[in-house]
Amino acid sequence: MNVRVVGAVTVPVIDLRATGQNIKNLRVDAGISVRDLQNILGFTNPQAIYKWQNGDSIPSIDNLVILAAVLGVTVDEILVQSSVPRSGL
């Protein structure tokens, strides 16, 4: 996890691996295949979806909104966050 120290505040950090696993679990629970999701999102190939699920990248905000709608959850329910204290400038 990459953390920078900035001021005396606790900030949320998105856990890419846990978020990716969460996307996969939510997709499977909803009975949606990777190919189905690929078609819904209008992707020509599923690479981006696999990258999300593996924690190699995170969906853009517009794709997060679509995912939330398709999976029947909120964006906050997709993202896995932790709080990291940051102090000093």
Image (cartoon, helix red, strand yellow):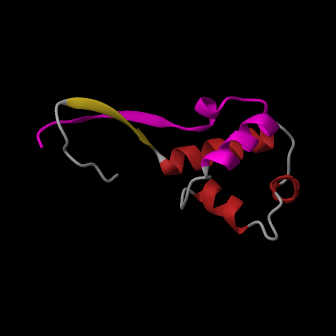
With 53 as the anchor, is 45 left or right in this view? Answer: right
In the rendered view, tell whether residue 51 sits above or below residue 65: below
- Residue at 12% from the left image edge and 43% from the top image edge: 89
- Residue at 50% from the left image edge and 50% from the top image edge: 16
In the rendered view, tell whether residue 73 sits above or below residue 51: above
In the rendered view, tell whether residue 73 sits above or below residue 32: above
In the rendered view, tell whether residue 20 sits above or below residue 44: above
Q: Is residue 12 magenta?
A: no
Q: Foreground: 62 or 30? A: 62
With 38 as the anchor, is 51 left or right in this view? Answer: left
Q: Is residue 64 magenta?
A: yes
Say how many tags the image has: 0
At which x and y percent is residue 55?
55, 56
- Residue at 88% from the left image edge and 54% from the top image edge: 36
Q: Residue furthest front?
A: 62
At which x and y percent is residue 72?
78, 30
Would you identify the image quadrant in which residue 49 lies? bottom right
With 32 as the anchor, is 83 left or right in this view? Answer: left
With 57 as the anchor, is 31 left or right in this view? Answer: right
Which region is colored magenta? 61-89
At which x and y percent is residue 7?
17, 36
Q: Foreground: 21 or 5? A: 5
- Residue at 66% from the left image edge and 44% from the top image edge: 64
At which x and y percent is residue 8?
17, 30
